[in-house]
Amino acid sequence: MKEKLHTIPVNEAFDNDGECPVCNMRKELETRAIDFTMGPSYMEDDVRAETSRWGFCGAHIELLYKNQNRLGLALILKSHMDKVIKDVEKLTGSSSRIQAPSIFRKQQTDNSGLVSYIEELDKSCYICDKINRTFDRYIATIFYLYRQEDEFRQKFRKSKGFCGHHYGMLYKLAPKHLSGEQLKDFISELDSLYLDNMKRVRDDLDWFIDKFDYRYADEPWKNSKDALPRTIIKTNSIILGK
């Protein structure tokens, strides 16, 4: 089965002592996609054609810029801009776009094609697409391993839960991959993992806040020193500092 090809990265993500193994998987895919895009591949015609067509979202253009391969990024963006200019010129050059006014109607602008093009361009991202194509298979692999392997089920139950976004994703997709008692067990375990670990991190954050009160200045930090970045994983699915 295809899922078997992805069991290693999925198991590694659950072995990682993080607040959301699904975030870990996605972050690893993002790092690899950035490295691939800014490596020698950007000189390949097929890759350049894709980056020219898709462009990049705001979050990923910032990561590409931080990669330090400024010449590579400049070449990629120049090709992308060339394509956008050509496409827009084609869309705006149509004589049917502007309808001549008459005494019976006001001048109308038929710009639906241009608007659709810009809206799609604004939503597209080469990095996001590259991540999602593999990420969807990773998610399917989670359910495959849960169905097939008791060792993974134990690993799943011992995890630190999930961020809100990926908790909801797993909850929604579970009936597609599981059924019967196994589905009930998965949902029950998923709920407990999410709530128990949200409360654990919430309590760590609460103590982190208390440590700024002079009354607790001499008390130990316990597990609260990194409570804020761990909270951001739980609430916003963002792994900081990687």
Image (cartoon, rainbow, N blue to C red):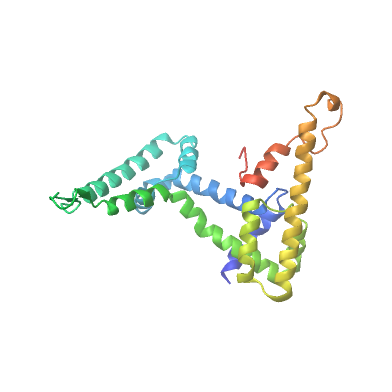
Q: Establish if 170 lies above or below 28.
A: below
Can you give x and y, in whole percent of width and height, for residue 159 in the image?
74, 55
Can you give x and y, in whole percent of width and height, for residue 125 in the image?
43, 49
Check the picture and name the quadrant holding the N terminus: bottom right
Identity of the residue drawn at 60% across and 65% down: 140
Identity of the residue drawn at 32% across and 44% down: 79
Q: Establish if 223 lies above or below 44.
A: above
Between residue 23 and residue 168, name the one nearer to us. Answer: 168
Which corner quadrant of the image does residue 153 belong to?
bottom right
98 left or right of 234 in image: left
Which corner quadrant of the image does residue 217 belong to?
top right
Can you give x and y, in whole percent of width and height, for residue 241 in the image?
62, 37
1 left or right of 150 in image: left
> Is residue 7 at least partly visible in the picture?
no
144 left or right of 78 in image: right
Check the picture and name the quadrant holding the C terminus: top right
Between residue 202 and residue 47, name the one nearer to us. Answer: 202
> Is residue 92 at least partly visible in the picture?
yes
